[in-house]
Image (cartoon, grey):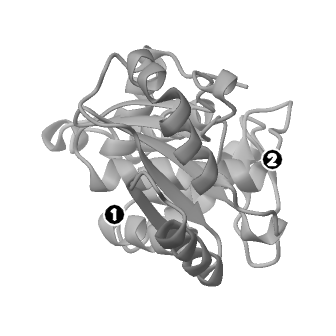
Amino acid sequence: MRLLSKEKTESLHDSSKLGTLNVRGSELEKLSPNQIGFMRDRAIIQSIVEFTALDTNQIRVLHCQGKAGLRKAQDRLQKLYATKALSRVPRAINQPYVYYIPPKKPQNLDHLIAANWVYIYLCKVYPDIESWTKEYQGWNNFGVQPDALAKISGLYYAIEVDRAESRNRFDKIDKYNSLYADHGEQVMELLNNPPKFPRIIIVTTEEKRKAKIEELIKVNNPHALKYMVKTLESIVKECSVCQS
């Protein structure tokens, strides 16, 4: 399980927030197409290092904006794949390739790509992401490990990615209420006493599952914890709108 350092978190946030080359317009005009391509390739590789893996659409959102962004992303990724700077793996039919740094393919790719979409979405929507920790382990002794923990404008958000296809019983509402009831003070101390208990962002892959989770929150949330429930499809669409 990998935790991002503060420096890596800041770098990850900056690359996502920019969504393109870190060059001023006046400087960009002086560069040749080959130079621009080289700089974009470096930015793409750096993002993949930091995210562990990214699919074509995520590269498009982060680094290849505009109407021709998808084609541009595909072209750059194909060149990086052809030169073996990147490896790739197909997913389901009609799903984009996932790219990673060779030689070792990351595990749980579907879950990883979904979690990466959440981070990209938060960067596009919220201007003040202060930190992002993958697979946050600070509450392991309490029986809870979020897929990520974000700090935004002084408040903490626990991120939970739910793949509806697994058909597992969704027990996160119970777990977070128990975390609050049994270990709330310890949780706050570990986070240096923020003004509020962490909010929980749940991203699931089906609309029916989303509705079921929202119903669970209504009937089984005794401590009135703050939840946001979204579908993966909706945040991908919102990211695409933000970058167009």
* Disc 1 packing (10 Å; few <14; some 14–19; many ≥20): some
Are discs 2 and 1 less than 8 Å apart at CB?
A: no
- Helix, strand or loop status at disc 2: loop
Q: Picture quarter containing residue 128?
A: top left
Disc 1 designates what residue? 243
From the top left corner, tell me how far across and down residue 39 is, in percent: 44, 35
Q: Nearer the viewer, mark 2 or mark 1?
A: 2
Residue 180 or residue 244, whichever sits in front: 180
Residue found 58% across the figure and 41% down from its top: 178
Question: Looking at numbered disc 2 in the image, what kind of residue is underneath it?
Answer: Asn
Q: Is residue 47 visible?
A: no
From the top left corner, tell me how far across and down residue 242 is, in percent: 31, 65
Disc 2 designates what residue? 108
Q: Which badge, 2 or 1, is on the more N-terminal residue?
A: 2
Residue found 62% across the figure and 41% down from its top: 147
From the top left corner, tell me how far across and down residue 44 is, in percent: 53, 41
Residue 140 or residue 112, whichever sits in front: 140
Q: CA distance from mark 2 to mark 1?
A: 27 Å
Which quadrant does the C terminus fall into? bottom left
* Disc 2 packing (10 Å; few <14; some 14–19; many ≥20): few
Residue found 80% across the figure and 38% down from its top: 106
User: Residue 125 vs residue 221: left or right?
Assistant: left
